[in-house]
Image (cartoon, helix red, strand yellow):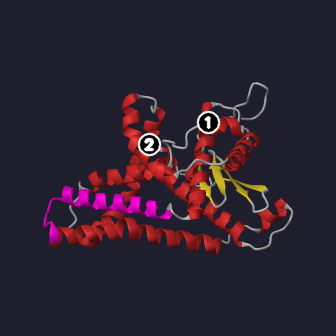
């Protein structure tokens, strides 16, 4: 099975083809886990499995689950008092749907401004007032360079925050746990610890591929006004995301080849900004989340792997 995940506040979310589980370590040291069935809305659409299109649906599903997971973890740690029983606590601290919608809208607006409006405005100013060029490819090259620079600067700035550093540690724990599962290791802390914190299927790598691809795809079109350029970028973003998904999927499949290692090297370098070596306690949380989705798949009669002594791994 393809196993992915995401770091959340004081925890890790892991997802499998049909379920996702969020494991959080509370202030008293207890680990709680919440399991949910993934929505099957995309499976009802016959074209959702087509190459180039399937990446768009995977992206949408990942975004929704990711925001739900972050909102849930924020809910847990925003409450000053919680029930002693873990099951009651998990039930009572469900994410507010209005908060979830507000978070999604706010994140979308900020993302559009930082990575679309701002780079486009700066590039348009440089084109008119400083560099005075007309080439569409050069325009999109400068626009892409500014977008990537803003992205890197954003990550670099937030990496100095103490809470973000801990989030990056959980990000590393999530990668290590995924590696251990893919390698067929028994899911124990000592087995997970030996794996790398950089993973080719990371969402950070996906974003970098999208930004690089955008330079070439945007250059195929020649909108005249800045508004037309902005709307064109929005319209083409799902298509670019679909291409990026297929590229990441293909590169991951052949990641042991020398040429592929060379091609994915920038993706792994970028992850050095968003991952840190986790503690054993953080690895333990990632394993709880991973075992949570594996157990859910087992109950759903999905394909799983077992150790030689019959234990789930």
Can you say which quadrant of the picture contains the C terminus?
Answer: top right
Where residue 107 appears, as percent x and y from the top left, is 50, 69
Q: Main secondary structure of the magenta part?
A: helix
Residue in view at x 39 percent, y 71 percent: 113
Horizontal side of residue 301 vs 167, given as left or right: right
Q: Nearer the viewer, residue 104 or 211?
A: 211
| Mark 2, other Cα within 10 Å: few <14 / some 14–19 / many ≥20 | some
Can you say which quadrant of the picture contains the N terminus?
Answer: top right
- Which circle's residue, 2 or 1, is located before the other in the chain? 1
Residue in view at x 22 percent, y 72 percent: 125
- Give the image quarter of residue 178: top right
Asked if the magenta segment contains residue 132, the reply would be yes
Horizontal side of residue 161 vs 110, given as left or right: right
Asked if the magenta segment contains residue 2, the reply would be no
- Give the image quarter of residue 222: bottom left
Visible residue check, residue 13: yes
| Distance Cα–Cα, label 2 vs label 1 | 24 Å
| Mark 1, other Cα within 10 Å: few <14 / some 14–19 / many ≥20 | few
Instruction: Give the residues in magenta.
Output: 130-158
Mark 2: secondary structure: helix
Mark drawn on residue 248: 2
**Count of numbered marks:** 2
Mark 1: secondary structure: loop
């Amino acid at each position: 099975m393809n196993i992915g995940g995401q770091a959340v506040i004081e925890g890790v979310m892991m997802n499998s083809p049909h379920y996702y589980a969020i494991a959080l370590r509370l202030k008293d040291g207890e680990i709680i886990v919440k399991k949910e069935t993934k929505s099957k809305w995309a499976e009802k659409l016959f074209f959702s499995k087509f190459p180039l299109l399937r990446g768009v649906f995977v992206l949408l599903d990942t975004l929704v689950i990711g925001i739900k997971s972050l909102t849930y973890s924020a809910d847990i740690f925003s409450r000053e008092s919680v029930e002693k029983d873990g099951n009651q606590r998990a039930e009572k601290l469900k994410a507010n749907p209005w908060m979830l919608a507000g978070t999604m809208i706010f994140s979308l607006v900020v993302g559009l401004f930082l990575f679309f409006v701002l780079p486009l405005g700066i590039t348009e100013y440089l084109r008119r007032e400083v560099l005075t060029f007309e080439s569409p490819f050069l325009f999109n090259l400068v626009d892409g360079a500014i977008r990537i620079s803003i992205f890197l600067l954003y990550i670099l700035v937030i990496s100095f925050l103490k809470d973000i550093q801990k989030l990056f540690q959980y990000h590393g724990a999530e990668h290590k746990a995924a590696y251990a599962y893919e390698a067929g290791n028994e899911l124990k802390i000592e087995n997970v610890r030996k794996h790398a914190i950089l993973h080719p299927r990371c969402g950070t790598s996906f974003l970098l591929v999208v930004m690089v691809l955008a330079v070439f795809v945007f250059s195929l079109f020649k909108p005249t006004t800045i508004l037309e350029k902005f709307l064109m970028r929005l319209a083409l973003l799902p298509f670019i995301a679909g291409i990026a998904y297929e590229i990441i999927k293909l590169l991951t499949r052949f990641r042991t080849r020398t040429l592929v290692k060379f091609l994915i090297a920038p993706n792994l370098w970028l992850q050095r900004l968003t991952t840190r070596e986790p503690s054993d306690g953080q690895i333990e949380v990632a394993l709880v989340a991973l075992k949570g989705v594996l157990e859910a798949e087992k109950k759903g009669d999905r394909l799983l792997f077992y150790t030689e002594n019959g234990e789930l791994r």
